[in-house]
Image (spheres, rainbow, N blue to C red):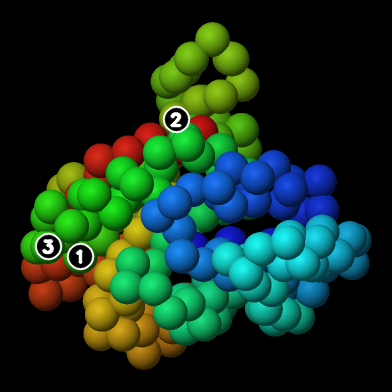
Amino acid sequence: MVIPVLNDATQIPHCLDRLVGQSAIAEIVVVDRGSADDTAWMVRVYTAFTETVRLVTAPGADPGQARDIGFDTATADIISHLDVCAMVAPDWSRTIARHMSEHPEASALIGIEACRTHRAIETTGPDDAVVQCPSQFDEKSGQAPGSNLALRRSVWLEVRTEAMAATSSGSDLDLALHLTKGGRRIDRPFFVR
């Protein structure tokens, strides 16, 4: 699990609270891009109570570079990327682990993502501010959002050099495009708010 952060002291506790207790998460790598607030301190509070959470500092890294640093740091067989503002279900990690186990041909998973920062496409619940993002998976092009992404570590190692060279813009789309090269399969079995 990789979470890039920058000045997210108010959001990181909520994010980590939803992840730390999930049984299928072996590690949570928080990559601090140079926060000027208490983000790193908040993460260190978690590292004092659980070996699951690790803090990596990457001052000046853009979001894509921070994600890539986190992927390189992570040691689990399945690596996930999540935006700090995402609210995952209590069974989120089990859903990923189960799907990857049952579908060994899947290289990666994405979820339909709800967010508060993009324009509305379709309301997804009683909270009118929560909408589906325009970055949803495009079946034709194979383009996938990366803020709710899980992939096999072996696949990351195959695409990392090209993907890292292309992510200077910080675009998750670059990674998704590299994943779909060579016919890699991306599934989408879950939803994140």
Secondary structure category for the residue under label 1? strand
Extreme residue toward the top, this view: 126
Front: mark 3 or 1: 3
Extreme residue toward the bottom, this view: 161
The residue that mark 1 highlights is 107
Image coords of residue 53 (percent x, y):
63, 66
Residue located 58% across and 52% down the image: 20
Extreme residue toward the right, this view: 37
The residue that mark 2 highlights is 132
The CA span between labels 3 and 1 is 8 Å
The residue that mark 3 highlights is 104
The CA span between labels 2 and 1 is 24 Å
Image coords of residue 105 (percent x, y):
9, 63
The three-letter amino acid code for the residue at tag 1 is Ser
Secondary structure category for the residue under label 2? strand
Residue situated in front as seen by the camera: 76 or 65: 76
Front: mark 3 or 2: 3
Q: Quadrant of residue 181?
A: bottom left
In the depicted structure, whether residue 107 falls above or below residue 17: below
Residue located 77% across and 54% down the image: 8
In the depicted structure, whether residue 62 falls above or below residue 97: below
Residue located 89% across and 60% down the image: 38
Front: mark 2 or 1: 1
Residue located 69% across and 73% down the image: 55
The CA span between labels 3 and 2 is 28 Å
The three-letter amino acid code for the residue at tag 3 is Pro
The three-letter amino acid code for the residue at tag 2 is Gln
Image coords of residue 43 (percent x, y):
76, 63
Secondary structure category for the residue under label 3? loop
Q: Residues within 10 Å of mark 3 (few under 14, many from 20)?
A: few
